[in-house]
């Protein structure tokens, strides 16, 4: 059998009856490295396999992935290795990371890249994966069949071509999702001039953007947030996608599925399935809201709410089962292009009482409809047309996952009676 010995230091030992030129070796070595990276860690990291990544110029002051993707706007992104976020966006599985000047992304689909599929790894591939876990460690030479080398090159070259084919479309999708046309530093500056508290908080929380999500996913995700916390909501959304969505990819022992369609959510057995998945009373709200939308409005109705005024869209959403003012405002802000919408939950209520409207703490033991409206109107007057964006910065800063011990001490001093919100209840 013709073989080539590849040593840990990259040197090549040629078998007695097989020779190949240095160009072929260079191509083979690069592609096998990328192949192993793909299968190990979602194309591993930017430094290991840059050819499979694309970039968008974007400074951290314009977007911070760690804040924006983990602050409770969306529940589909997972940071499975530090600084690398993988999730599902418009039916595509993608991984994001960032440097000081760019956001980097790589996309996966079964059609685009057979090397990144749900199929089990072959014994030969498994050996290569293990041998490249630590490139600095000394490992013995390994034997790779020349026929397999050619196959790997063909596979990875076709993967590169496919990735490039939709490059422009993928960038447009990400720009739209993160609303990169909005000049965030200018908004921060504007809010800081009119609000000294915001100016103080914003120093430690730059780059927090409001996402522009798919309306169906956003609505039904936030129906699940009632009396809930971020980690549990995330788990619930994972389960409903696995149960009712379409399988897209299997990466690093994680399954990635599309969000269920309205038709799937409105099926006669959906409520029972959701109860089995631990949705409790929310199961009925999800099922009945999907049925109402399809029977009374049609599948394009939610998208159409992007074109109507804020108050009209909010009122329409509040007519759905399980949708109150907070859920409606979340959907208006994060999916329906209504930047003036200000969702008010327990976090925002506490922020308002502590830093802006101290009178709300006098005799108001619960968040009434009147208090809800007063908070929203006050913030819209203070922050202007993008009040919901400013609110998102303060909301993020109040989450315990983003606070240092010193921050917690200061917060406790400001409000001794304030209960510790360990679970980040919405």
Image (cartoon, grey):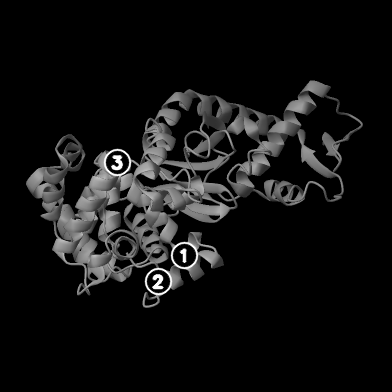
Q: Position of residue 29 (x, y in %)?
A: 75, 33
Circles 3, 1 touching at the beta carbon (< 8 Å):
no
**Res 147 seen here:** no
- Tag 2 residue: 421
Residue placed under numbered mark 3 in the picture? 386
> Which corner quadrant holds the C terminus?
bottom left
How far across and down, in percent of the image, does residue 359 sit?
Answer: 23, 66
Q: Given this view, does label 2 or label 3 mark the residue nearer the observer?
A: 3
Q: Earlier in the sequence, mark 1 or mark 2?
A: 1
Q: Are marks 1 and 2 in contact (CB under 8 Å)?
A: yes
Compute the Cα span from label 1 to label 2. Answer: 8 Å
Residue at image x 24%, y 43%?
Answer: 340
Distance from the alpha carbon under mark 3 to that under mark 1: 25 Å
Where is residue 338 shown, x and y percent of the image? 24, 41
Question: Which residue: 29% across, 69% down?
Answer: 227
Q: Position of residue 63 (x, y in %)?
A: 47, 40
In the shown orientation, is residue 46 left or right of residue 414? Answer: right
Q: In which quarter of the view is residue 5 placed?
A: top right
The crowding category of the residue bearing disc 3, from other C-alpha atoms within 10 Å (few below 14, some 14 to 19, many at least 20), is some
Which label's residue is closer to the chain start, 2 or 3?
3
Q: Is residue 312 above or below residue 322?
A: above
Q: Is residue 193 left or right of residue 67?
A: left
Extreme residue in the left direction: 296
Q: State which mark lies toward you, 3 or 1.
A: 3
Q: Does the rendering let one see residue 152?
A: yes
Q: Report the Cα–Cα distance between label 2 and label 3.
A: 27 Å
> In terms of sequence position, does the residue under pointer 3 or pointer 1 come before the other?
3
Q: Could you say which disc has been placed on residue 400 in the image?
A: 1
- Between residue 183 and residue 325, name the one nearer to us: 183
Observer-nearest of 362 and 274: 362
Secondary structure of residue under mark 1: helix
| Element at label 3 | helix
């Amino acid at each position: 059998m013709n073989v080539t010995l590849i040593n840990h230091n990259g040197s090549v030992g040629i078998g007695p009856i097989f020779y190949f030129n240095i160009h072929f070796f260079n191509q083979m070595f690069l592609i096998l490295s990328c192949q192993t990276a793909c299968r190990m860690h979602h194309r591993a990291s930017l430094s290991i396999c840059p050819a499979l990544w694309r970039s968008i110029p974007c400074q951290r002051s314009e977007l911070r992935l760690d804040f924006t993707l983990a602050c409770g706007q969306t529940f589909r992104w997972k940071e499975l290795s530090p600084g690398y976020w993988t999730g599902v966006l418009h039916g595509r599985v993608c991984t994001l990371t960032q440097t000081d000047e760019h956001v980097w992304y790589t996309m996966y689909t079964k059609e685009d890249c057979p090397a990144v599929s749900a199929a089990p790894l072959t014994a030969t591939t498994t050996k290569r994966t293990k041998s490249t876990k630590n490139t600095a460690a000394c490992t013995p030479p390994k034997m790779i069949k020349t026929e397999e080398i050619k196959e790997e090159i063909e596979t990875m070259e076709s993967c590169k071509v496919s990735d490039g084919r939709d490059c422009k479309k993928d960038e447009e999708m990400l720009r739209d999702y993160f609303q990169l046309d909005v000049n965030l530093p200018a908004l921060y500056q504007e809010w800081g001039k009119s609000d000294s508290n915001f100016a103080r908080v914003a120093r430690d929380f730059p780059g927090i953007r409001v996402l522009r999500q798919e309306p169906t996913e956003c609505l039904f995700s936030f129906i699940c947030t009632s009396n809930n916390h971020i980690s549990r909501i995330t788990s619930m959304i994972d389960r409903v996608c696995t149960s009712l969505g379409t399988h897209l990819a299997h990466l690093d022992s994680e399954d990635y599925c599309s969000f269920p369609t309205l038709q799937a959510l409105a099926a006669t057995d959906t409520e029972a399935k959701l109860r089995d998945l631990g949705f409790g009373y929310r199961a009925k709200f999800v099922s009945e809201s999907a049925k109402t939308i399809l029977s009374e409005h049609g599948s394009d109705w939610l998208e159409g709410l992007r074109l109507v005024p804020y108050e009209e869209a909010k009122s329409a959403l509040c007519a759905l089962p399980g949708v109150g003012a907070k859920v409606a405002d979340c959907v208006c802000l994060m999916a329906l292009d209504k930047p003036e919408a200000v969702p008010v939950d327990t976090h925002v209520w506490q922020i308002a009482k502590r830093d802006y409207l101290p009178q709300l703490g006098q005799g108001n033991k619960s968040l009434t409809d009147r208090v809800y409206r007063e908070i929203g109107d006050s913030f819209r007057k203070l922050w202007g047309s993008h009040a919901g964006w400013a609110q998102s910065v303060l909301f993020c800063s109040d989450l315990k996952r983003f606070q240092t011990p010193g921050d917690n001490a200061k917060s406790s001093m400001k409000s001794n009676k304030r209960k510790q919100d360990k679970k980040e209840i919405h």
